[in-house]
Amino acid sequence: MSITNKITVRRAEIAVAVILALCSIALMIKSAENRITWNAEENMGAGFLPFYLSLGMLICTVLTIIKFVLKRSPQSKDDSPFIEAEAFKYIAVTIISLVILVLAIGYLGIYFSLIFFLAFYLRYFSSKSILFISVFSLITPVLTFLFFEWLLKIPLPQGISEPLFYPVYDFMYS
Amino acid sequence: MDVFILLLEGIFVSFEPLNLGLLIFGCLIGLFVGAMPGLGSVNGVAILIPITFIIPPTAAIIFLAAVYYGAMYGGAISSVMLGIPGASTAVATVFDGRPLAVKGEAMTALTAAAVGSFVGGTVSVILFTLFAPPLAEVALRFNAPETFALMVMAFATFVGLGGDDVPKTIFSILIGLALSTIGLDLITGKPRLIFFNIPGFLHGINFLVLAIGIYGIGEMLWTLEETKGKVQMSKLSVNMKEVGRAFGALKKTIMAMNIGSFLGFFVGILPAAGATPASLMSYGITKQLSKNSKEFGSGVPAGVVAPECANNSASTGSMLPMLTLGIPGSPTTAILLGGMILWGLTPGPLLFTQEPEFVWGLIGSLYIANFFTLVLNIALIPAFLMVLRIPFAILAPVIFVLCVTGGYAPTQSLHDVWLMLLFGFAGYILRKLDYPVAPAVLSIVLGPLAEKALRQSLILSDGSMGIFFDMAEKPIAAIIMYIAIVLLIMPAFGPLYRKFFKKAQTT
């Protein structure tokens, strides 16, 4: 039995509800670092709203868990896989490549990271030729650069590749 | 008469070269975004908002409203040709649009959708022009308690009319509100919820980070899972004879047009509703009232016209509370409202007096956009079909690039890009488990405004919550609050009603 068959909608429903309940408790604890009381003299403490909003979230997740236990929600009776094996491949590869992309942006800068991201993604999921993938992966970051840096004047992160752009900036602003 | 002059001025504003250029460009992008499976107006507006920072607010709102409008038209294209709704707003269009395409009458379905959208859009923008100024005038008398009561009603509408699981809906509202409290407390200036002392949290969470995360990353993951890149396109023959026959078939859809246009507008005004429930309701009611109700679902033009009229009408309707009350009527208008704050405007009735060019430029542009979108839609059908043939494996990374750059641009912080990814993954998982995500986006936009209104009200009342329920002093706030309470408890009576109804039927 593959991992995607083991994770049923039913299991995902309870797991997510429990995680959200824990997150709500964490938010309550974090909110309590500020004053969470409210009265006419002192007005509202900075932690008051986030604390009670998180308490509300906790109550909602507890209700979801109760509905699950009583089998009152459609998800609590659904033993089908949460995600099909084929779709899982798409989702997992996409998520991992996105995480690597953002990690790389901090180091390599956005433009070089985009080249690698696009080349990998297209090579992995599409049946396009190497030539198409190369051209597409190079043109997209160039257009991104022109749009953000030249048209919008918004500098995007360049990491260690920043010195390579100095001549381009000299040309753009001279 | 005043309204007519203001409207004319607004139309002149939208004809200014920059505005007109952006309007046509927005319509085109909207049609494209709407036509792509999985992408709708909300995704388009969320992803594109960062690029509006360099243009004046009037041009920005005209551009984004045109994207919104175009997407409503475009949604029908993939519903008919692929059998996959371009967006949730076009779900009902599949019911009869796809069978028509399968029967070889795709052109009839596409023409019915375009003309229906045009009629719905035109009727609703006329209603909008008539209703907006008086409503704004009433809203000018609103103070903090009324504003807060309105926001509570907006949240309550999601619970009462959203139709989703109630605890999950409330959770979604509360998490959006809780996220909006991150950063510096607006009264005491104390930092709140600064996790792991990461400085990025000090400036709070920009609503765009959540919106792009959920509607950009999350939606693409959802669509990747749904389609796995495999789509089956119907055949289409485009010639004048087909177009003429398609227009001829529209004679029998007058009732559908009326229902879609008026119902769509009024459903669109409701904060929780927007275009998706409007189109579904319009389809259902048209089917019920039609003499040929049994034929619905097998491919009748009225089944395409009704939802398409309604979704366009609702999209305009949802802008009415956004402009006049500062309360969005749909997820897309929630993002537009957030955009208005980013552009330095204060959403609400004061816009009508302080920024008439902005308001009437937008209203005028809706008339123009409606016309251009109809023409572009029908003229460019072959081009959109080419676009639909682009493999998802190519489109998806381009959307991801737009999301990453769009998430970074507003604050120029990688911290926000990480958050956007996190919200995207979380939104995808939560949506799979039927947690509605739209309330969270609405809440993060309205959260700071609601908190400000609440705290101002409590200062006015020396800390008493009674200010929101005082029929003598604050009747409008009290009435709105009582309506909100009714909406909040309404779902509890749903099962009782169904039980009673079942019993009555059996006896």
Image (cartoon, coloured by chain):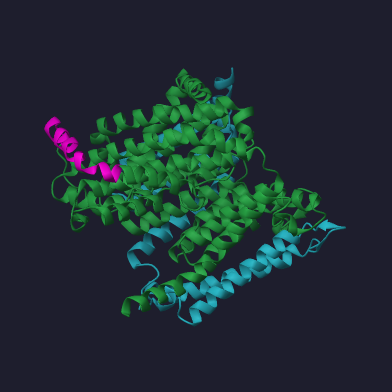
Q: Residue B459: image x %, image y %? A: 80, 51
> Magenta part of the protein: which range?
B238-257
Q: Horizontal placement of B371 versus B365: left or right?
A: left
Q: How many marks?
A: 0
Q: Horizontal placement of B293 versus A9: left or right?
A: left
| Residue at the farthest bottom position | A70
Chain identifier matching the green colour in the rendered picture: B
**Could you tell me what secondary structure mostly forms the magenta stretch?**
helix
Q: Horizontal placement of B82 versus A124: left or right?
A: left
Chain identifier matching the cyan colour in the rendered picture: A
Residue shown at 34% from the left, 49% from the top: B90
> In which image quadrant can residue A26 be found?
bottom right
Image: B128 above or below B219: above
Q: Residue B458: image x %, image y %? A: 77, 53
Image: A13 above or below B204: below
Magenta residue check for B210: no
| Residue at the farthest left position | B241
Q: B201 or B500, which is in the foreground?
A: B500
Q: B167 or B313, which is in the foreground?
A: B313
